[in-house]
Image: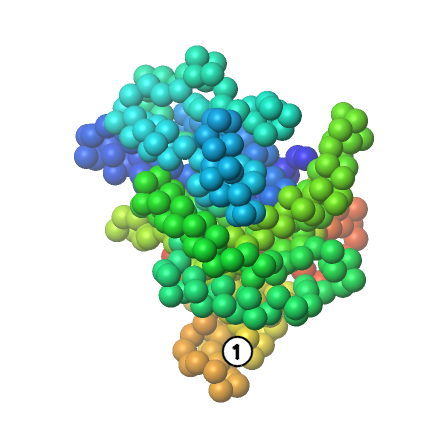
Amino acid sequence: MAIDNTALDLVVSLVLPSIQAHRKQIDDEKGFRRPFVLGLSGLQGSGKSTWAVSLARALSDHHHFKTIILSLDDLYLPHEELVRLRESNPNNRFYRNRGQPGTHDETLARQFFDDLHSGKDVALPSFDKSSFNGEGDRVPENEWQKVSQDPPLDVIIFEGWCVGFLSLSDADLQAKWSVARDSIISSNTDGGKEHLAFQLEVLGTHSFEDVKLLNDNLKRYNETFMGPCHFDYLIHLDTDRLANVYRWRIQQEKALRATKGMGQTNEQVIAFVQVYMPAYELYLEKLRKEASLPRRGADGLRTQTRIQLDDNPCTSTRSTFALASTSVYHSRNPRKRAMDSPMNEDYADTWSHPADAGGARESSGRAPKRRRTNTNGGPTGERGIMRDGNRTGLPRFIGSGSRINLVMTVYNVLARSHTGQGRNHHDAAGVVPGEEDQLTGPSP
């Protein structure tokens, strides 16, 4: 699976100002060059590894930042301890296999990052998932990749499926679990008969005690090595249809069976993915709606980007993007919202037109902002701003106070533009950065 270079350049352009500001601050303080920690969170099958490698190559080859990658998967406990964890929780389905918070070596993770930030040479932990008939085991330490800090490391990309997840308070956890428990019988509402086997609401099938253990483990992760204070920037690979997690994994296993003669069956994939659904039910909503990382520095640069993937991650067009500065809106014309979001349900689909604001262009030559306010009795106040671009063929850029950049895939747009066909309903005409964003990038 390849990532289109244009898409990659646009994402790098969002992260780059923060890396440069980080480097400048350290140089001004004349201190040790602490590496910039770039978190990469992504659903199963979303292409985390491919994105991590592509980002590392771009930062290293094109911007000359010394960059390494650490996967959360490489921090798993050794096989013996994973077995002990499973046997000590015989009725807890979360810990029958590795994957969930609690199956990683927190001491190893904390020591690795402590050594990294203190300027010591480090070795990248490694985990062999094929050992013990697929149960996996840690690779011997003498086989780990050595990383010298001479010259100092600039960027570390830390990728994992639950990177960016934040634990809930006991009260919030109880509330979410109670609602889920009460709605176990309710049908899947993600749309379409094909989703019936792809259960998206399984949190309520677990006991509260098991769910609380999961949340307590995540809380420790947040405190020791995987909380907001441990990252400088977060990229989140996401989808607006959670059932895609099943599809993507099924596609991956199908490709494995075709090329290597081995891979999970569809039934095995569904069983595998279902174990992760409760965590998505608990933590994904907050990650989508709120910027978990504070703004850094006096310039207030944004520190979080959400990449919304289309339904088919195996096509080359999957990495064609329209850009927005928030996960709230994506618009296909100046006055209508084209993307549904739970955050928007109290707001009508109305944006003020430039003429409503006098129609005059600003001194910069850009079109005036459009502001979206409540018109149907919901909360009042501005919910976002939008501008028309000065050129066609570029995405539309929308800004709001959520502090999250959204990079939204536009399926088939690249193929259509290359063949001269008209664009589909995700028309991506006209982009300019929001006031607080530092976006520069080539046009698609």
**Residue 224 percent across, percent down from the top left:** 32, 40
Q: Is residue 24 above or below residue 318?
A: above
Answer with left or right where residue 314 lies relative to residue 20.
right
Colour scheme of the picture = rainbow
For image coordinates 63% across by 50% down, the residue present is 274
Image-quadrant location for residue 221: top left
Q: Residues within 10 Å of mark 1 (few under 14, many from 20)?
A: some
**Residue 410 percent across, percent down from the top left:** 66, 53
Q: Secondary structure at mark 1?
A: loop
**Residue 133 percent across, percent down from the top left:** 64, 25
To which residue does mark 1 refer?
347
The residue at the far top in this view is 142
For image coordinates 58% across by 59% down, the residue present is 205
Answer with left or right where residue 350 lies relative to residue 369.
right
Q: Is residue 265 visible?
A: yes
Q: Nearer the viewer, residue 337 or 119?
A: 119
**Residue 9 percent across, percent down from the top left:** 54, 40
Q: Nearer the viewer, residue 384 or 131?
A: 131
Answer with left or right where residue 13 lies relative to residue 336.
left
Q: Is residue 45 above or below residue 54?
A: below
Q: Nearer the viewer, residue 143 or 173?
A: 173
Q: How many marks?
A: 1
Q: Inspect the image, locate mark 1, and give the three-letter code of the amino acid beneath it.
A: Tyr
For image coordinates 44% across by 35% down, the residue present is 104
Q: Is residue 401 visible?
A: no
Q: Nearer the viewer, residue 82 or 200?
A: 82
The residue at the far bottom in this view is 377
